[in-house]
Amino acid sequence: MPALLNPRHEKASQLKAEGTLNVDAYEKVYGKRSKQAAHNLFKRQDIANRVAELQTIRAQQTNETVDSALKQLGITKKWWLGSLKLNAEKCLLGKQVYDQAGKPIPGKFTAPDVHGFNRSMELIGRAMGLFIERMEIGNPGDFARLTDDELRARVESDAQALGIDAEATEALLLTFQGEKSDDAE
């Protein structure tokens, strides 16, 4: 998508893609502060699309820069995981205790650093995919505007696209179906 024809819209899109708050971006471009006008501006589909495109470009550039730096430094996933493992082991062992002359006392260590160990193990677990990362997809309120039938159709469509069979989808939908009160009947 090329730059937006309206230079103000393009500048606002760029500011938003850089992480500027809607109202702040609007104020920088239009010279006045208006939450409602900022909301309306960034709700426009052409501007939302441009912001998304600019964010994608920025993410690609960042990834390329990081990949290049990691390669130059010789940092690989194997090296990173090995370093985390070594760190976890050191945290369990504790720190070496020294005498008054500054010499290490053999076999004498401080208490283990349980927090450091747990953090290292968490990072290893994340790298191994042991944790589920949850994130919201879409804009806030996207599903709130759907009727029950529309929401059901959306869930069934998404489940089918993910390869989840119809029985499992139905079981999932039944799990989230609210109990009907006697007043509703």
Image (cartoon, rainbow, N blue to C red):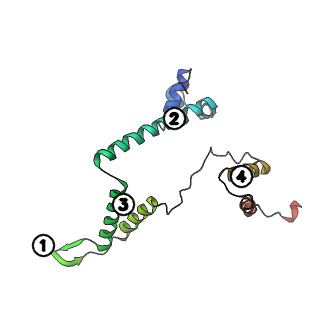
Q: Is residue 70 above or below residue 58?
A: below
Mark 3 vs mark 1: give the one in front: 3
Most extreme residue toward the left is 101
Element type where label 4 sits in the image:
helix
**Residue situated in front as seen by the camera: 18 or 154:** 154
Disc number at residue 16?
A: 2
**Residue located 54% across and 60% down the image:** 132
Q: From the top left corner, tell me how far across and down residue 102 is, in percent.
A: 12, 70
In space, the residues marked 4 and 1 are separated at their CA atoms by 66 Å
**Residue located 50% across and 26% down the image:** 11
52 left or right of 92 in image: right
Q: Of the residues shown, which amino acid type is indicated by label 2?
A: Lys
Disc number at residue 81?
A: 3
Disc number at residue 103?
A: 1
In space, the residues marked 3 and 1 are separated at their CA atoms by 31 Å
Q: Of the residues shown, which amino acid type is indicated by label 3?
A: Leu
User: How many C-alpha atoms fall within 10 Å of the one at disc 1: few (<14), some, or many (≥20)?
Assistant: few
**Residue located 22% across and 78% down the image:** 108
